[in-house]
């Protein structure tokens, strides 16, 4: 079993790269006397069919698109941090008996076997010490296990190398999301949700430490597909309708029976919401007594009009939309563009912050 770190080199400032099915997002941050700044950023469409559910299906096409977005954004650093996501990518806090640090890795290997949905020999694993806890007089170590299939990690590294980049780190997307939202410092228990086109990442963060993450293989694409069928239009027109009407609470497309649009779109969201609810139930069962105070949304899908209110009603939690730029000031010149893209930039910003934080 190899460690994520075995693949990596130590570096200074780096650019964060978030490869999604719908868009490639890049962010470069730097620390200044006035705080941390988003120095450069870019969002560009992913070549159609080249990414799906966290998998890179066409490394060459994605590499060219990354080169282009970096060039356009004016990013010159060649050091990159990239995220991975998908069905077999996860992070979880585990408890171990107090053992010497050199034995932690081996102990985690046994533990990982119980938690990974795929063979541990095919995984790259990263372990971070969290803290020591004493409960009922028993001392235990809390460690954060992060795991991803080796093939997926290698595909991301090769893709970045294809874009003439040096990979400083590969990180679980949901952990980058937590850093991007500054939850690493926050108190209390929050659930963070990154709504993409083909994936939805969920992370529960407790007192600044991500406790568990999960990826649901559903995203905003589901809605576009339903709208395509409902309106009998092509995907691009359906996408426009989705952006214009959102859940259709204020206004919906003409020539449809009253409420038909809202009903269909809400139904399309139902399975995703059920799976998010299951993740929260899992967390509550594992961490009895811990109360989730709220939900924070990011990713392009979080911009769906009224989604925050809908999720709040369904999950009985206060829901807000993330602004990673609350912690990282955007460049003056492009302030407006940065704020418009902010929720979609959360993971890329979180990745870049890894090197300056
Ligand atoms: N204003 C909007 N209203 C509704 N949906 C939107 C809006 N803007 C973007 N989206 C949706 O957001 C999604 C793209 O967001 P994002 O860039 O976070 O996804 P991705 O990272 O490419 O996908 P994935 O993570 O699944 O690979 C698309 O489904 C798109 O339709
Ligand atoms: Mg994404």
Image (cartoon, grey):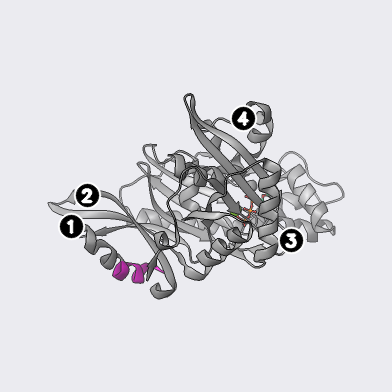
**Quick one: quadrant of the N terminus?**
bottom left
Q: Secondary structure at mark 1?
A: loop
In three-dimensional space, the C-alpha distance between marks 4 and 2, rounded to whole angstroms, equals: 40 Å
CB atoms of marks 3 and 4 within 8 Å: no
Q: Secondary structure at mark 2?
A: strand
Residue 33, how many percent across, how many down?
A: 47, 24
Nearer-N-terminus badge (4/2) = 2
199 sits left or right of 35 in the view:
right
Nearer-N-terminus badge (1/2) = 1
CB atoms of marks 4 and 2 within 8 Å: no
Residue 98 tag number: 1
Local crowd size for mark 4, using a 10 Å CA cut-off: few (<14), some (14–19), many (≥20): some
Residue that extends furthest to the left in the rendered view of this protein? 137
In terms of depth relative to the viewer, which is nearer, 125 or 323?
125
**Does 222 lie within the magenta span?**
no
Residue 87, how many percent across, how many down?
A: 52, 65
Q: Residue at x 49, y 40 (%)?
A: 181
Residue 331 tag number: 4
Residue 172 appears anywhere in the view:
no
Q: Residue at x 66, y 43 (%)?
A: 42
What span is in magenta?
A: 109-116
Q: Is residue 182 above or below residue 65?
A: above
Q: Residue at x 35, y 71 (%)?
A: 113
In three-dimensional space, the C-alpha distance between marks 3 and 1, rounded to whole angstroms, equals: 49 Å
Local crowd size for mark 1, using a 10 Å CA cut-off: few (<14), some (14–19), many (≥20): some
- Reading the image, the residue beneath label 3 is 48
Q: How many callouts does the rendering have?
A: 4
């Amino acid at each position: 079993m190899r460690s994520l770190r075995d693949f990596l080199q130590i570096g200074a400032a780096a650019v964060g790269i978030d490869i999604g099915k719908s868009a490639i997002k890049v962010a470069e941050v730097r620390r200044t006397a006035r705080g941390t700044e988003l120095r450069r950023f870019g969002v560009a469409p992913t070549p159609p069919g080249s990414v799906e559910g966290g998998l890179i299906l066409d490394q060459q096409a994605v590499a060219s698109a990354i080169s282009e977005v970096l060039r356009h954004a004016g990013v010159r650093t060649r050091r990159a941090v990239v995220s991975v996501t998908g069905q077999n990518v996860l992070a979880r806090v585990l408890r171990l008996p107090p053992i010497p640090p050199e034995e932690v890795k081996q102990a985690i290997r046994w533990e990982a076997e119980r938690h990974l949905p795929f063979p541990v020999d095919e995984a790259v694993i990263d372990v971070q010490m969290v803290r020591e806890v004493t409960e009922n007089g028993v001392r235990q170590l809390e460690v954060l296990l992060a795991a991803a299939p080796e093939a997926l990690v290698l595909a991301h590294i090769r893709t970045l190398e294809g874009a003439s980049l040096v990979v400083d780190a590969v990180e679980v997307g949901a952990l980058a999301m937590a850093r991007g939202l500054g939850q690493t410092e926050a108190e209390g228990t929050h659930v963070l949700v990154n709504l993409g086109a083909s994936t939805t990442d969920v992370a529960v963060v407790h007192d600044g430490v991500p406790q568990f993450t999960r990826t649901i293989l559903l995203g905003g694409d589901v809605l576009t597909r339903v709208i395509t069928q409902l309106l009998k239009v092509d995907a691009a027109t359906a996408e426009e309708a989705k952006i214009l009407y959102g859940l259709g609470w204020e206004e919906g497309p003409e020539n449809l029976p009253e409420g038909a649009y809202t009903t269909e779109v809400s139904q399309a969201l139902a399975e995703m919401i059920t799976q998010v609810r299951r993740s929260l139930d899992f967390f509550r069962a594992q961490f009895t007594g811990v109360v989730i105070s709220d939900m924070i949304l990011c990713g392009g899908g979080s911009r769906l009009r009224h989604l925050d209110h809908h999720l709040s009603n369904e999950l009985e939690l206060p829901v807000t939309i993330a602004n990673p730029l609350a912690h990282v000031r955007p460049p003056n010149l492009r302030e407006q563009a940065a704020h418009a893209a902010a929720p979609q930039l959360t993971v890329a910003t979180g990745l870049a912050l890894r090197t300056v934080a």
